[in-house]
Image (cartoon, rainbow, N blue to C red):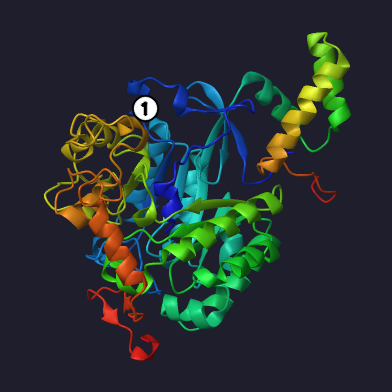
Amino acid sequence: MLPRHAKLKFDETRQRWVILAPERVLAPDDIAVEILQLCDGQRGVAQIVDQLAAKYAAPRDAIGTDVIAMLQDLADKGFLTEAREKDT
Amino acid sequence: MSPTLTDATPLAADPNDGLNVLESRGSTAETFGIPLAVLAELTHRCPLQCPYCSNPVELERASGELSTEEWKKVLSELAEIGVLQIHFSGGEPTARKDLVELVRHATEVGLYTNLITSAVLLTKDKLAALADAGLCHVQISFQGSEADIADRVAGFRNAHAQKIKAAGWARELDLPLTVNAVMHRQNLHQLPDIIQMAVDLDADRLEVANVQYYGWALKNRAALMPTLEQIEETSHIVEDAQVRLKGILTIDYVVPDYYALRPKKCMGGWGRQFFNISPTGKILPCHAAETITGLDFESVRSNHSIAWIWQNSDAFNRYRGTGWMPEPCRSCEFKEVDFGGCRCQAFALTGDAGNTDPACTLSPMHEQIFKTAETEASGDVNRFIYRNFNGGTPEADAQHDA
């Protein structure tokens, strides 16, 4: 899930999705937005991959590689955090 | 207040990771679109007296500050015209009794809120109230890794201990935390400990910002200027820590430009992607812009909209783009990379804000400022002039001078 300091928001003025974080505004592409919207603290990575593979009728392996690479990258940059048990 | 906020680009991303920088794909017209982030300097009042304070030497008094209703109107207007983030700063923003109300209002109109604070006036209850009001992020300034140096730099007893406590409360409240460390000759040796302190405080981010020399810091340059050796070592320490702490702590680093080859892209270019609002409501291209004499800044109290001031006011257009540039900037291949560097620094060091920033090796004055920096860095002046409403007060005890 997105940590509290990172917020995914649709920017009406510029008509696109943005991630708001301390001293940064990032403009994720459509695929990144779709993945981030699935990162709700409930779904696991496998479920996210399944859902996208089904939606795009694409091979699970290929989607999985892309999704994991993107999630790792977002996590390294501090834009993803693990969901905690107490967060309901 | 955070030097990296304005001196480093507020927009950063690796173009290869599927996250593209919003404005980098824009046309020139879009580049002058409304900034994504705005700095609101709610007040110049502050219990600390840091000798490198980024506020102007002529501080604005409490009696002139915008009222709660005026700030709320400003926040609504900012959200309406497309600003996404608001940084509440000062002075010390928690010195304003209406801060919770302002954070709540900013949240209601959809702004991402960041509090840039010295933390010495915070209590756990106050911080909890701010979190409840929707505060997204807290940035606490530290003056060192331990009380001796930190409290002396701040000119405030027990400041350091109070900051450590407040950082702990922020994490208890699940507020994300940035540790902001302003570095100079007298605390650079503590950098490894400051990095460890940020990890121990469970901060997400650390800003290591070398002092930028205008206003108060220029008055104190001889006491603050680091040596070239210190800067080289600092860069190694930061680079190592960035690798070692990947995924644990993000470290943003601002180098002192006196020792750089190219000037910094100050503010991302004058009037291109940033403005701040002073306590009395003036819209400024940079928090130090008022050091430049001969520029008139429009206020939110004027009959102009904020968007009009951004787009049309003389102060914003004077150094916008590249048309104003003299040589060596005019024919320089880097002119759209650094936009001629920092106008305030050009003014402070050459007397004309329209000159090339002397931090640039191509400036005819570069050699001279580099020598000045080297001389001052190796000198024995360590006594501070503290920032206050009376134009500054020398440190009482001169024992710090070698």
Position of residue B150 in the picture relative to residue B57 (left or right):
right
Q: Is residue B124 visible?
A: no
B74, B91: nearer the viewer: B91
Q: Looking at the rendering, which quadrant does residue B268 occupy?
A: top left
Please state the horizontal and vertical placement of residue B122, each as a whole percent of the image. Answer: 53, 69
- Residue at 79% across / 44% down in the picture? A82
In the figure, is residue B285 to the left or right of B264?
left
Q: How many neighbours does mark 1 have within 10 angstroms: few (below 14), some (14-19), or many (20 or more)?
A: some
Residue furthest to the left in view is B294
Residue B282 location in percent, x, y? 25, 49
The answer to whether any part of residue B247 appears in the image is yes
Picture quarter containing residue A21? top right
Nearest to the observer: residue B256 or residue B140: B256
- The C terminus of chain B: image quadrant: bottom left
Q: Where the N terminus of chain B falls, by quadrant?
A: bottom left
Measured along the vertical axis of the image, is residue B324 above or below residue B348?
above
- Residue at image coords 28%, 62%: B371
Name which residue lies at 43% across and 67% down. B184
Q: Position of residue B69 (x, y in %)?
A: 35, 51
Q: Is residue B57 above or below residue B82?
A: below
Q: Is residue B364 above or below residue A29?
A: below
Nearest to the observer: residue B287 or residue B354: B354
Q: Give the tally of numbered discs.
A: 1
Percent across and percent down for residue A81 are: 74, 44
The residue that label 1 is drawn on is B31
**What amino acid is at disc 1?**
Thr
SS category of the residue bearing label 1: helix
Considering depth in this image, is B225 or B32 the residue closer to the camera? Answer: B225
Indicate the chain on which mark 1 is placed.
B
